[in-house]
Image (cartoon, grey):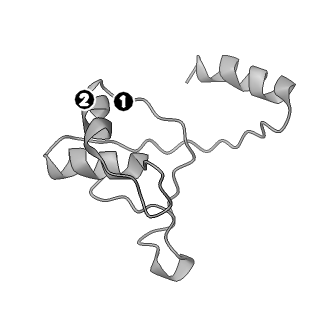
Amino acid sequence: RVIDIVEKPKPEEAPSKLGDAGIHVFEPVIFDAISRIKPSVRNEYQLTDAIKMLVKAGRTVVFKKIHLHIDVGTLRDWWKTLHLIDYM
């Protein structure tokens, strides 16, 4: 269960050794949270801000640890990854 999430912390400030590698599955409530977040100092909308908003509102957000690294440096690798995700 997620209790906090930090966007791009400095290594010495990271609260754990876990990282978010970018495959997400959310309930539709995430879109409401995303619509309410403000852009970061880099003028980007951070998914981590929406996740924090859900956690603060008492919603359960779960992080599933998957020991898998996939290089998608080529179009062929990316395509293979799309098919792999269907089985996760």
Farthest bottom residue in view: 12
Residue 40 image offset from top left, x and y in percent? 42, 58
Using a 10 Å C-alpha cutoff, classify the residue at mark 1 as few (fewer than 14 neighbours), some (14 to 19) or many (20 or more).
few
Contact? badges 1 and 2 (CB < 8 Å): yes
Using a 10 Å C-alpha cutoff, classify the residue at mark 2 as few (fewer than 14 neighbours), some (14 to 19) or many (20 or more).
few
Q: Residue at x 66, y 41 (%)?
A: 68
Q: Which residue is mark 1?
A: 26
Farthest left residue in view: 58
Between the residue at mark 1 and the residue at mark 2, the CA separation in whole angstroms equals 8 Å
Residue 65 image offset from top left, x and y in percent? 49, 45
Q: What number of labels is visible? A: 2
Q: Is residue 37 above or below residue 34?
A: below
SS under mark 1:
loop
Residue type at mark 1: give it.
Answer: Phe
Q: Residue 1: tell me if it is visible.
A: no
Q: Residue at x 39, y 51 (%)?
A: 48
50 vs 7, left or right, is left
Q: Is residue 43 above or below residue 54?
A: below
Q: Please name which of the two marks, 1 or 2, marks the residue nearer to the observer.
A: 2
Q: Residue at x 45, y 69 (%)?
A: 16
Q: Is residue 26 above or below residue 3?
A: above
